[in-house]
Amino acid sequence: MTASPRAERMQAVYDQVPAMADCKGACWISCGPASMTPWERRRLAAAGHPITTEDIARKAPFDFWCDALGPDGRCTAYGIRPLVCRLWGAVEWLPCPHGCRPEGGWLPDEVAFRLILEAVRDGGSGEPVTQEMFDQLRDPVRLAAIRREFAGKGASDTARFRAYGDVLPVAVTRRPGLPRGKEAGDGS
């Protein structure tokens, strides 16, 4: 079975993110609300990983963990994880709280932002991606503004890490009242 042209384009985007050679496998602390394209969301759902939408998950960002996070703290959808998950720890503004770094150092901001734009375009979010948007990444003033906008995006993960340390909560879950996925033994 051959991959669709969209899947091939998205894989080409994913392949540009450097590997995390020194990964300690403890990044579950950062597996919270995540932005993704509609295509990435559909692909995860088709593989049995329906992910709570970002707007719902952000209602409890400190206590929310990704629906694909397994009880051992590992991603059960690792091979098909969205771009934002792949960028985690690979760019300076989304640092791993454990200090892991990608092979060859962090991905340059301009490259990371270009990959995000390509994923938005190729993932079919419906948001237009123009050549002007790509050109803005070459403008030092605009690039500095984008860096400031993204600076500290990992702050909630750092706070979460300080609260939980490296001990995975017994139940990887969300606050009561938020939609829950089907879980073993809950009868749903």
Image: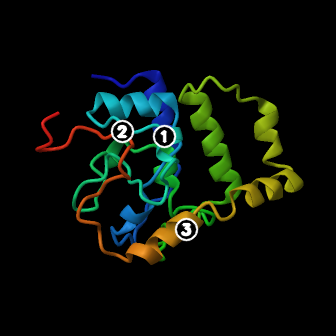
Query: Would you place residue 165 above or below residue 112 in this image?
Result: below
Q: Residue furthest front?
A: 177
Frontmost of labels 3 and 1 is: 1
Q: Which mark is residue 95?
A: 3
N-terminal-most mark, 3 or 1 = 1
Q: Position of residue 156 (x, y in %)?
A: 55, 64
Q: For the residues marked 1 and 2, what is the alpha-carbon distance in whole angstroms?
A: 8 Å
Residue nearer the viewer, 142 or 36:
36
Distance in Å between CA atoms under marks 3 and 1: 24 Å
The answer to whether one can see residue 98 in this image is no
- Dot placed on the residue nearer the N-terminal end, 1 or 2: 1
**Classed neighbour count for the residue bearing mark 2: other residues with Cα under 10 Å, few (<14), some (14–19), many (≥20):** few
**Would residue 125 be found to the left or right of residue 142 on screen?**
left
Q: Are marks 1 and 2 in contact (CB under 8 Å)?
A: yes
Give, as a three-letter code, the residue at label 2.
Pro
Can residue 135 be seen?
yes
Quadrant containing the C terminus is: top left
Q: Which mark is residue 56?
A: 1
Circle 2: element type: loop
Q: CA distance from mark 3 to mark 2?
A: 29 Å
Residue 20 in the image: x percent, y percent? 43, 65
Residue at 31%, 47% (x, y): give it: 68
Q: Quadrant of residue 52?
A: top left
Residue at x 46%, y 37% (from the top left corner): 53
The numbered mark at residue 179 is: 2
Amino acid type, mark 1: Ile
SS at mark 1?
A: helix
User: What type is the residue that disc 3 sits on?
Assistant: Pro
Residue 136 — which label? none
For residue 92, above or below residue 2: below
